[in-house]
Amino acid sequence: VEAVTLARAGRPSGGVTKATFDEARRGEERALVRRAQEGDMAAFEQLYRENERRVFAVCVRMSGGASLAEELTQDVFVRAWRKLSSFRGESAFSSWLYPIAVNTALSERRARVRRTSRVFATDDLTPFERAPEVKQAGPEAGFDLEAAMKDLPPGARAVFVLHDIEGYQHEEIGRMMGIAVGTSKAQLHRARALLRKSIER
Amino acid sequence: MTCENARERLDDYVDGELEASALHELELHLASCPSCREEEEVLRSLLARAAELPRTMAPGRDLWPGVAEAIREEKRSRVLGFERRRVVFAGFLAAAAALVVALGLPRPGPDPGTPPSTGSSVPALVAASPGSDLREAEADYERATKALLDTLEEQRDRIAPQTLQGVEQNLAVIDEALREVRAALHQEPGNPELTRMLAATHHKKVEVLQRVVRLSTSRL
């Protein structure tokens, strides 16, 4: 509230810059984190409210389904609560939180792969390539990227989400996913090629 | 450059990761190849769409109550874990007391204080001393325990087999309690309650051994 008031007050004269706003916001966030680290659930709830939608979006896109993403989002915040003492406030809380979201979604995927690997091979391209039912009416105009992403093989989808939507670099993706930079690039190439085919259909 | 080579490099091209020479070569190819140019346009359009996707989405229900409940549950299970260790410790104390009764020994008073000396050096009860102090105190207790066990071994023939079996069983219970408390301390180093439990368990072991040794020597 304080940060918003500062920014509003500054707007007419132009005296308060975006940097001042960010600084005030960070100060407010650090205070919330400190309270949450001391066990204050109300403070942690506020941090949750501020980040829930972004975390949920990452989980939806990484997992490919809203109901699984709801569970994952809850899991992300429980994990974040557990690890809260390790957050030193050197970066924004969101920069610390999003990799936890990505890793939670990835580890759920790995667990699912282990559970289903006895039944069918994962990262199989054929389901995607044999999916004429997702074909759109017009070429690019009616193209639904969210729907097409769901049909990507999970590894390729994860890298596409992290690189082309979330803006992570291949080095960061490699660290988070435990894969080589070259593998991350290859997965991105694969995802883009499949999505391009989908656009052209 | 072939169309296949060009398409392989399109990703690096649009990401601005192509080196100068490869970049020049690809741009020459694109200038003369409408089909690859179209591929490039489709790729750029795909990336533009990805960049336009909303970065936030609202879940269909309020997820906070579930998060709060899971955290509360976790806090409760931590407390229960601590309580469980207290129960194990209480079980050990009961076993040690039963041993004292079985041997017909006088019960220790409310404060065990310093047990009667058998010539071994018994360290004082250590209260909440983490780190090296605790390790030193444990080493002291272990030395005292070993001296008493050696004495007991020498007296072995003079103790009834049934009594000896009872002593061994009860020492096993005490050792199990020591392992439990040590493992818990490993999880929560410096926890004063656990430190107190560890010191008290060592103290009890020494005390029980001293009483058995005293009993066997008095019956000589």
Image (cartoon, helix red, strand yellow):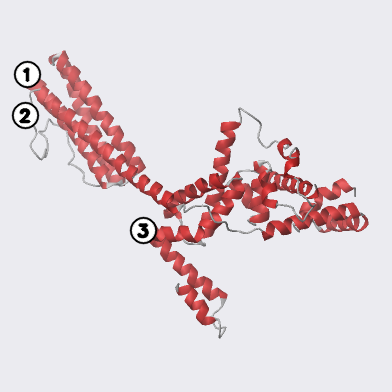
- Left or right of residue A119: residue B97: left
Amino acid on which disc 3 is placed: Asp
Please rate how many residues cluster around mark 1, counting C-alpha atoms within 10 Å: few if below 14, some from 14 to 19, many from 20. Answer: few
In depth, the one of A137 and B129 nearer the eye is A137
Is residue A175 visible from the viewing direction of this image? no
- Residue wearing tag 2: B106
C-alpha span from label 2 to label 3: 51 Å
- Residue wearing tag 1: B219
Viewer-nearest of labels 2 and 3?
A: 3
- Residue under the point 68% across and 60% down: B52
Mark 2 or 1 closer to N-term?
A: 2
- Image x and y of residue B216, in percent: 11, 20
- Residue wearing tag 3: A40
Chain assignment, label 1 = B
C-alpha span from label 2 to label 1: 16 Å
- Residue under the point 12% across and 30% down: B118
Amino acid on which disc 2 is placed: Pro
- Image x and y of residue A33, in percent: 43, 61
C-alpha span from label 1 to label 3: 63 Å
Please rate how many residues cluster around mark 3, counting C-alpha atoms within 10 Å: few if below 14, some from 14 to 19, many from 20. Answer: few
Q: Quadrant of the C terminus of chain B?
A: top left
